[in-house]
Image (cartoon, grey):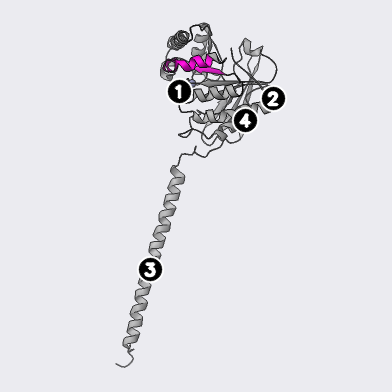
Amino acid sequence: MHGQKIYSDNERYKHYKKKKNRKRRGVFIIAVCSVVLLFLSFFVSQKIFEPKVNNEKPNAITKSNKKNDTKSGGSIIKLSLKTNEQEIKFAQPLANEEYQSADPEKCVYLTFDDGPSKSVTPLILDTLKKYNVKATFFVIGSMAEQSPDLLKREHDEGHTIGNHTYSHKMNLVYSTPEACVAEYEKSEGVIKSILGQYDSKLIRFPGGIFDTDKNRLIYRQALVNAGYHYYNWNCSDQDSDGRVPSGGYASSVLLDWVKRTSLVGNTTGQRLIVLMHDAPAKKTTAEALPSIIEYFQSKGYKFKILR
Ligand SMILES: [Zn+2]
């Protein structure tokens, strides 16, 4: 017994309690750490996997290059908007004779593609009426077949109707030059049958065909040879830039894009052709339209229609 420590019952109990508390504390710390780790991993995974477009605002605009278009006599400035993952190209619309000789005053052409749609086109028409602004609608033939009353309304209210193919299916439109021409002819037939009379050859290409789109130039040439004339754009609300979150960009973001792109992409700053869409899902475009119109009014632009 000599040298051996003798514990009393009380001490033994205290020792046991201490041990138990230590164990409890350990379990508690492990539980807290697990919860913290769980939260951290959830947060990190959200950061990694959330679509980057959701809260994304346009970044700085950078000028990429400049070259002269000797054919039209005007100059083309190709610009790009650098975003996180994508570069969106803008080019001066390839000016045809009519565009070149247009009024020299500061003017803006609002254009709406891919309609008419029952959900968005009436809202856009209401706003245009309210502000007494005329616009240009590049309609899809198959959409017009579904909403002939809306096509009539666009026409009756003084807006220009342009042709934007019958199906808008890229693999069909850009399969052969003949198929491309046929797409426009079919759509033209639909527009004529609804409006009674329609002799315009005004068109826009799905996705646009700029000088830099080398693979598509044969289609553009085919349509020009067939007597059509086309317009691209040099300003846009980016409502269909391929990164649009479901539900569309907020209207404030669309306005922001219009402001930014209106400051680039044209040599004079005088004439802007604004690309927007009145397709079924583009509700925020309709929401943004009043502020877009007010912005151009505040900058002294006159609203015009393409012919
Ligand atoms: Zn389109």
Q: Nearer the viewer, mark 4 or mark 1?
A: 1
Q: Nearer the viewer, mark 2 or mark 3?
A: 2
The amino acid beneath tag 4 is Lys
Q: Which residue is mark 1?
A: 118
Give 113 or 23, whichever is nearer the viewer: 113
Q: Which residue is mark 3?
A: 26
Instruction: Give the magenta part as a residue range.
Output: 135-155
Q: Which residue is mark 2?
A: 300
Q: Are marks 3 and 4 in contact (CB under 8 Å)?
A: no
Q: Earlier in the sequence, mark 3 or mark 1?
A: 3
On residue 285, the disc is none
- Look at the numbered disc 4 and say if its residue's Cβ is closer than 8 Å to ligand 1: no
Q: Earlier in the sequence, mark 1 or mark 2?
A: 1
- Alpha carbon separation for disc pair 2 and 3: 71 Å
- Alpha carbon separation for disc pair 4 and 1: 28 Å
Q: Earlier in the sequence, mark 2 or mark 3?
A: 3
The amino acid beneath tag 2 is Gly
Q: Residues within 10 Å of mark 3 (few under 14, many from 20)?
A: few
The amino acid beneath tag 1 is Lys
Q: Residues within 10 Å of mark 1 (few under 14, many from 20)?
A: some
- Alpha carbon separation for disc pair 3 and 4: 59 Å
On residue 259, the disc is 4
Question: How many numbered marks have been drawn onto this rendered protein structure?
Answer: 4
- Alpha carbon separation for disc pair 4 and 2: 14 Å
The x, y position of residue 118, in whole percent, is 45, 23
- Alpha carbon separation for disc pair 3 and 1: 64 Å
Give 122 or 88, whichever is nearer the viewer: 122
**Residue displayed at 50% across by 10% down:** 223
> Element type at marker 3?
helix
- Alpha carbon separation for disc pair 1 and 2: 32 Å
Q: Earlier in the sequence, mark 3 or mark 4?
A: 3
